[in-house]
Amino acid sequence: MGIPKRVAIFVSGTGSLLEAMIPQKDELGIVLVLADRPCRGLEIARAAGIETELVKRTDFNPKRFDAERDVYTLRILQILIGCQIDLVAMAGFMTILHRVIFERGFKGRILNTHPALLPMFKGNHVVLDAILAGVKVTGCTVHVATEVRDEGPILAQKAVDVLPNDTVETLWERIKVVERVLYPKTILEYAATLK
């Protein structure tokens, strides 16, 4: 087995997915956890001895943030280059980055996980969307992030049954259980393909 790639995990919230990866942090090559706001994900990383960076957003209104999205993304790009990051895995990271990150070395090097079986149910609120649509099966998808949200090449998917009495919370929790296994496995497999 070769030298692990240097992986950065991007978080915005509770860090439950990151927490599931911590036992494999060395195998996965996790050397950095970056967040767009103060959050539990940063605390989890620090407790595990992983370097952290907070690149705090000044505005969480998407329309107002558009004016500074490129500058914000360039700040993140500088950190990634400075830390010699090979691969980024977004784990609940809620900021959409500017295309500059893909143009300057990270095209095909940012992964994301999505709580639905893409191409169905793109965007936010997808667990609720699945329940409202009355589907019998949903799941999670690991894909390569691109400039167009939820459109990148699909790397792995796992189905999760939608039960008749499911709420958003119960269904989402079952999706997370599957995601916590699928995402690290897919990161490892994908990282092994990178030069």
Image (spheres, grey):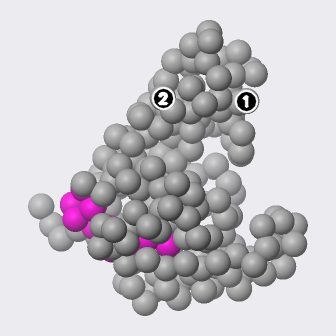
Helix, strand, or loop for circle 1? Answer: helix
Q: Residues within 10 Å of mark 2 (few under 14, many from 20)?
A: some
Amino acid under label 1? Asp
Bounds of the magenta segment: 24-34
Query: Measured from the top left, where is residue 116 in percent x and y?
Result: 59, 34
Query: Measured from the top left, where is residue 141 in percent x and y?
Result: 51, 40
Tell whether position 47 is magenta: no
165 versus 14 height, above or below: above
Horizontally, residue 59 falls left or right of residue 4, namely right
Task: Determine which of the numbered discs, if any, sits on residue 174 in the image.
Answer: 2
Residue drawn at point x = 39 percent, y = 85 percent? 83
Query: Measured from the top left, where is residue 70 in percent x and y?
Result: 72, 81
> Quadrant of the rendered structure where residue 149 is?
bottom right
Which residue is most to the right?
Answer: 63
171 versus 150 height, above or below: above
48 versus 150 height, above or below: below
Residue, disc 1:
129
Horizontally, residue 43 falls left or right of residue 168, namely left
Residue drawn at point x = 87 percent, y = 72 percent? 64
